[in-house]
Image (cartoon, rainbow, N blue to C red):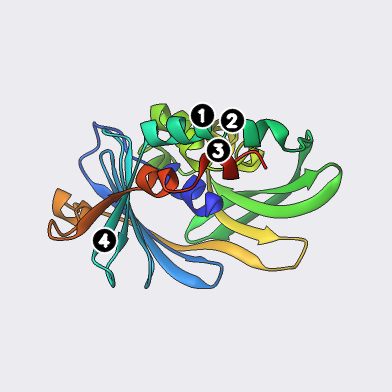
Amino acid sequence: MKKVMGLIIFIILSNSVIAGVIIDSVNNGTPSKTFIEGKLLKFKTKDFELIYNGKSKEFYQINHSQKQVMVITKQDINNFKAMMGNFIANQQTKTEHYTYKNIGRKKIAGCTCKGIKVLKNGIATEEIYFCNDKKLLKYIDKNLLKDFEEMTSFGSHEKSKEMYNSKLLIKYGYPFYIKNLQNGRIEFKVNKVHYKKLGKNLFTYPTSYEKRSIMNMFNNIPISNFGQ
C-alpha cells in the first residue's frame, strides 16, 4: 500500500493548473486509475477507492459495499504515533543503506524513461524506470510530498522506503515501471497518461455514507496492547 500511495501522491497538481490528469496503470496485476486535478486526487481500482484532499490533508477510503467512508487526517497520524510511542521504541531498528545504479533508458507509455537499479545493503532489489516528462512534472505540488511521506509511514516504526521519498522522486521523476528483482514480478506499470478537465464532483463520495474516524477504531484497542 505504501508504494501505491507514494506513487500517486507524486503527481498531485499545483493550484495554477486548470486541466486534470488521468494515469492508467497496472498495480500488482490489478488495473488502476489515478485522477488528479488541483489539490484533489483519486485512486481507483475495481474494489478500492481512495480520495486525497491536499488542502485539508485528509484521506477518504471509500467502501461502497458497506456504504462507509474511513477518514484519516494528518492529526490522526500524529496522535497514533504518540499512542504507539512505546511500541515503536521497543522495535529493533536497522539502518538500511540504499544505492542506485543507472541501467539505461526505454520508452514506456510514450515517455522515454530513465532506468535505475536499486540496491539495498548491496543486494539488487528493484528495477525502476522514471518518466521525467516536463508536461507531467509541471503538475507536481512539491509542498505536499513531505506531508504525504508522513502519511504513508502511518502505523510503521520504519520510515517510508527511501525509494519513494520526496527528494528521490523529485530527482528522477515519476515511476512508470517497477520490477521486484527478488521474485521477478512487475509491481507497477503505467500504460497511458492523458489530460482533461475533471471537475470537483469526481473527487467526492456519497453524503449518505457513514463517516468513520480511524482514531475511533484504534481507541477501542487497549493501550496495554501496544509496547508488548
Image quarter of the C terminus: top right
- Report the amino acid beneath label 3: Leu
Circle number at residue 169? 3
**Please, is residue 11 above or below residue 69 in the view?**
above
Which of the 4 quarters of the picture holds residue 176? bottom right
Q: Residues within 10 Å of mark 4 (few under 14, many from 20)?
A: some
Q: Which residue is mark 4?
A: 68
**View extreme (right): residue:** 122
Q: Which residue is mark 1?
A: 82
- Nearer-the-camera pick, 86 or 130: 86
- Nearer-the-camera pick, 19 or 200: 200
Secondary structure under tag 3 reads helix
Earlier residue among tags 4 and 1: 4
Marks 2 and 3, how far apart at CA: 29 Å
- Report the amino acid beneath label 2: Gly
Report the mark closest to the observer, 2 or 4.
2
Earlier residue among tags 2 and 3: 2
Circle number at residue 2? none
Report the mark closest to the observer, 2 or 3.
2
Marks 4 and 1, how far apart at CA: 27 Å
Marks 2 and 4, how far apart at CA: 29 Å
**Please, is residue 61 above or below residue 77 in the view?**
below
Instruction: Tell me residue 129's x, y (percent).
Output: 62, 52
Q: Is residue 154 visible?
A: no
